[in-house]
Image (spheres, rainbow, N blue to C red):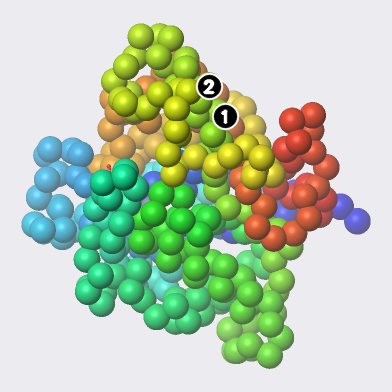
Amino acid sequence: MSLVPADMRLLLVHAHPDDETIQNGATMARYVAEGRQVTLVTCTAGELGEVLVPELAHIAADRDDTLGEHRREELAAAMAILGVTDHRFLGGFGAFRDSGMKWHEKGYAIAADETDDRAFANADLTQAADELVKVIREVRPQVLVTYDEFGNYGHPDHIQAHRVAMYAAQLAAVPSYKRDLGEPHDIAKIYWCAMSEARMRESLRALRASGDTETFAGMDPEGDMGPFTTPDAWLAAAIDGGEFGEKKIDAMKAHRTQIDPDGPFFAMGGSVGTAFWSTEFYRLAKGEQGPVGADGFETDLFAGL
Ligand SMILES: CC(=O)N[C@H]1[C@@H](O[C@@H]2[C@H](O)[C@H](O)[C@@H](O)[C@H](O)[C@H]2O)O[C@H](CO)[C@@H](O)[C@@H]1O
Ligand SMILES: [Zn+2]
């Protein structure tokens, strides 16, 4: 018996406010519009993020340290734009703190400080996973979305979010595991967010053809796309957010302390069209791939259920 939209439940697990919109904003908006249940769990409040708004410089972690509260409001605004009404912080707001990051010379993120015991990246994995087991056993999603084992670009909070999500998905399904956290639930399909290498190349080609040499400066459309993209042969699904691409861009703009409306994110949307942002790609980490299109990709994360 195929699922009806109201019975379709998607759970997303992300590290910081803004990740959900950047990675899955069009997917979430489309599924909400189609009547499916979308639940977002954000593991930290992003307390150690940038503050790209000069008049808000005082809220930074090394000043008033109120960026987390501000990003909570940015997240609420972004979710209102996408139509997502069920969004939670793992363990409650402030339970796990942003770990910070710095850039490795090879261009990916690494831990800024491995000693801060408040940091999510240093949290007890079982304690953090139990918080998510409670949500999984309550929401009972058929589909879970999180990051790959690299956290998509190496950020320690993204890597920890991957570990917590994958571990909690295992624990939640075990009948003998902590029944006080709810009745067991086995998630049918687990996907990892991905940036399509082919899509990145074609978008960079369009940018360079438009004369833009600044955006992602130094990246050659025919060269190495670096650790942030995924070979298309590894991808299982391409979700066309269609008209929801505009909502995604508006929701990204709601994360104003983190995303510069004149920055590379929007340059990709500007000259190569919102299409760059409205199609979101996924690797299948658990479950069977459902029916696919001519391109070999599922067009629905619930395909086959
Ligand atoms: C998209 C994402 O995961 N952002 C994280 C990340 O932010 C980066 C960080 O501030 C870095 O110093 C900047 O150069 C880079 O431009 C930012 O994207 O790390 C932050 C600190 O852990 C985190 O709050 C933010 O959400
Ligand atoms: Zn993040």
> Mark 1 and mark 2: span between their CA atoms?
6 Å
Q: Is residue 186 above or below residue 142?
A: below
Q: Secondary structure at mark 2?
A: helix
Q: Are marks 1 and 2 in contact (CB under 8 Å)?
A: yes
Residue at the far top in the pictured view: 210
Q: Residue at x 15, y 52 (%)?
A: 59
Q: How far across and how far down the image is residue 81, in percent? A: 46, 39
Using the image, tell me which numbered label, if any, was put on residue 202. 2
Give amino acid for label 1: Ala
Q: How far across and how far down the image is residue 71, in percent? A: 30, 51
Q: Residue at x 35, y 69 (%)?
A: 121
Q: Secondary structure at mark 1?
A: helix
| Of the pair 138 and 195, the residue shown nearer to us | 195
Q: Is residue 146 above or below residue 211?
A: below
**From the viewer's perspective, is 148 left or right of 179?**
left
- Numbered-mark total: 2
| Of the pair 192 and 31, the residue shown nearer to us | 192
Q: Residue at x 33, y 74 (%)?
A: 122
Q: How far across and how far down the image is residue 264, in percent? A: 34, 28
**From the viewer's perspective, is 99 left or right of 185?**
left
Q: Is residue 47 visible?
A: no
Decide: few, some or many residues near mark 2? Use Cα within 10 Å; few <14, some 14-19, many ≥20: some
Q: Which quadrant holds residue 110? A: bottom left
Badge 1 is on which residue?
198
Q: Is residue 165 above or below residue 238?
A: below
Using the image, tell me which numbered label, if any, was put on residue 219. none
Viewport quadrant of the N terminus: bottom right
Q: How far across and how far down the image is residue 68, in percent? A: 26, 58
Decide: few, some or many residues near mark 1? Use Cα within 10 Å; few <14, some 14-19, many ≥20: some
Q: Residue at x 44, y 78 (%)?
A: 125
**From the viewer's perspective, is 121 left or right of 36?**
left
Give amino acid for label 2: Glu
